[in-house]
Image (cartoon, rainbow, N blue to C red):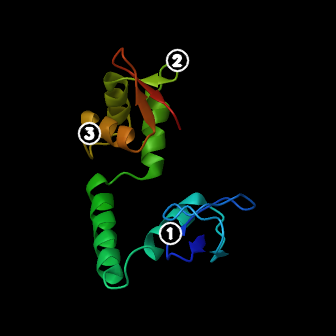
Amino acid sequence: MLRCQCGRNFGSRANSNAICPRCNKKTSLSTIKSFSSSSELRDAVSKANVPDEIISELSSRLASYEKSERSKEGFTSDDIQKILALAKLPDDSITISSINESMITLKIKKMSVERFIELLETSSMVLRNPNGSWSVLQ
């Protein structure tokens, strides 16, 4: 994570010619911290750029939102992988009916098939095909 003199924090790959996204300057950049994953960097940059006056309120709201989303969905990544493994067709695509059969076989009734597909799409795990099927990306 880099910090510019203008006060902006941002991420950049090591040994790259970083430019501040706010003021477009290459000079006056200091390295604050290095991260091993892009998600850790993203979270640190987001928190670093939030004004001190609202950081605690924002953090508590995000934590409660994430907790409620996890409990609503009720799916673990293991559940999702099992459903997808059973639902995949020979061409590595899935359909509503293949997902439905997979959920019935696994006796999973936590949400509707349509909602499950929506969850997969918003998580970028599948890509909708024009023929009414989805390609599994992960």
- In primary-sequence order, the first of circles 1 and 3 is 1
Q: Earlier in the sequence, mark 3 or mark 2?
A: 2
Q: Residue at x 52, y 17 (%)?
A: 91
Query: Residue 115 has which mark?
Result: 3
Residue sitting at 33 percent across and 64 percent down?
66
- Callout 3 secondary element: helix
Amino acid on which disc 3 is placed: Arg
How many residues crowd around disc 1 within 10 Å: few (fewer than 14), some, or many (20 or more)?
some
- Please provide percent x and percent y for residue 121: 37, 37
**Image-based side of 33 in relation to 93, left or right:** right
Nearer-N-terminus badge (1/2): 1
Q: Quadrant of residue 133?
A: top left
Q: Of 112 and 125, which appears nearest the observer?
A: 125
Q: Position of residue 50 (x, y in %)?
A: 39, 75
Classify mark 1: helix, strand or loop.
helix
Q: Are marks 1 and 3 in contact (CB under 8 Å)?
A: no
Viewer-nearest residue: 42 or 114:
42
In the rendering, at what x and y percent does residue 73 appear? 30, 52
Residue on which the image places disc 2: 91
